[in-house]
Image: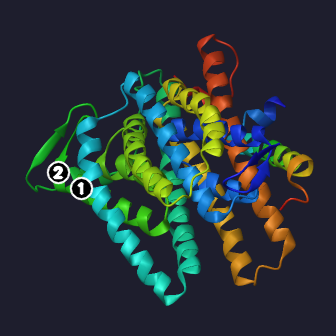
Amino acid sequence: MFEFIIAGVTVPVFLLVLVGLTVGMVGGFVGVGGGYMVTPALIVFGFPGYMASGIDMTHIAGKGVVSSIRHRELGNIDWTLALTMIAGTMLGVELGVRVLVHFKGLGISAIVLLITSVAIMLSLFIYTQVETHRAHKKLEQLTREGKEIGREVQTSNLPRLFQSIPLSPIIRCRHARVIISMWVIVLVGAATGFLAGFLGVGGGFIRVPALVYLVGASTHIAVGTDLVEIAVSGSYGALRHSIEGHVDMMAVLFMIAGAMIGAQFGSIATAFVRGPAIRYILSYSLILATVGAVLRLVYIITGQNIEWLSLAAVMLTLGEMIFLCLFILSLVLFAVRHRRGKWVPDWVQSLVI
Amino acid sequence: MKWLINRLLAFWLLLLAISLGAAALVYEIWLKGRI
């Protein structure tokens, strides 16, 4: 147990390290900050809501830097794409925050936010799940035929549509192997930034699918590039929260201690799998986060007096982090076994490298 | 066990059950009565 004087709570230290470790691993693997998991977890541990956001954002900044460095070494970052998108993201975030303030003025922000979150996450889950399943089937077919497979297979036609928009200037993202109008990247950044600003999240879970399905980057490049955005936006958010006094640095330090290890492992784990495996994990994290948001929505609508709903939300918050980590660890374990020629499940063979 | 791991959905459900069990354990030991 450790007493966090600034936050005014006493929490077992290992729980904070565990949250940092698990969310760091998921973030490094999928390319998200994980705010939708960390903030509810910190509230469950007793931190006030505003402080949970501040601690979360500050630890995301640290984790984003560590993951970005590791992904740069793995060659998963396209700097042209990252820097162009950041410009759009900043504009979008500002607009999103202003719309949020408008809704707050009307007094319905919590319900509007949760309904929007559920709608977006559910739509993204369905699309990524259907597309990834199709890509997985294609991979299995190619494996059966004994053909050489790269680390990416995706079946969506949307990237071709967006890459064919003839708006100057057209830019070449060499590393992502994408030639596309600069305005498309800026607009995708602005749209995802708007949603992130409106929902009050980092937005990685929206940007990674957008980079894959709209811009046409491979999943590995989308993950690495998005982590650069997370490092930049997280650092700005951390600075803002620190100025407002929303950060307990001791809590951040314990979380970052876990996140350093988790983020490195998650980033390195991407080298063991093909794109669809990363998209599966992203998709699973989306559906679990959706269920969590639905529980919170029902809790608010029913007047916050149903005890089992609150308990279910706690279980889901903790269970989600453990589940995603176990899945990533299993994939790495299966990949190592596959390399050594040992038995692995049929569904894994085409997903690992 | 091999049958369970060999199917994606079954493996998914197995991991989910283990995770929720671990979450329940964490709740019982460290969080009960504090929330």
**Amino acid tagged 1:** Val
Residue at numbered disc 2? A182
Which chain does the residue under circle 2 lie in?
A
Provide residue A165's location: percent of width, then percent of height: 16, 56
Most extreme residue toward the bottom is A106
Provide residue A108's location: percent of width, then percent of height: 55, 85
The circle drawn on residue A186 is: 1
Identify the residue at horizontal 36%, vertical 63% (top origin): A93
| Label 1 neighbour load within 10 Å: few <14, some 14-19, many 20+ | many
Residue in the foreground of this view, choosing between A285 and A8: A8
Most extreme residue toward the top is A340
Most extreme residue toward the front is A5
Most extreme residue toward the left is A168
**Up-down relation of residue A346 to residue A38 (above or below):** above
**Up-down relation of residue A286 to residue A249 (above or below):** below
Q: Is there one chain holding both mark 2 and mark 1?
A: yes
Identify the residue at horizontal 37%, vertical 36% (top origin): A221
Identify the residue at horizontal 51%, vertical 73% (top origin): A116
- A65 to the left or right of A309: left
Query: Can residue A31 be seen in this snapshot?
Result: no
**Amino acid tagged 2:** Met
Q: Mark 1 and mark 2 in contact (Cβ < 8 Å)?
A: yes
Residue in the foreground of this view, choosing between A51 and A275: A51
Count of marks, rendered view: 2
**Up-down relation of residue A250 to residue A161 (above or below):** above
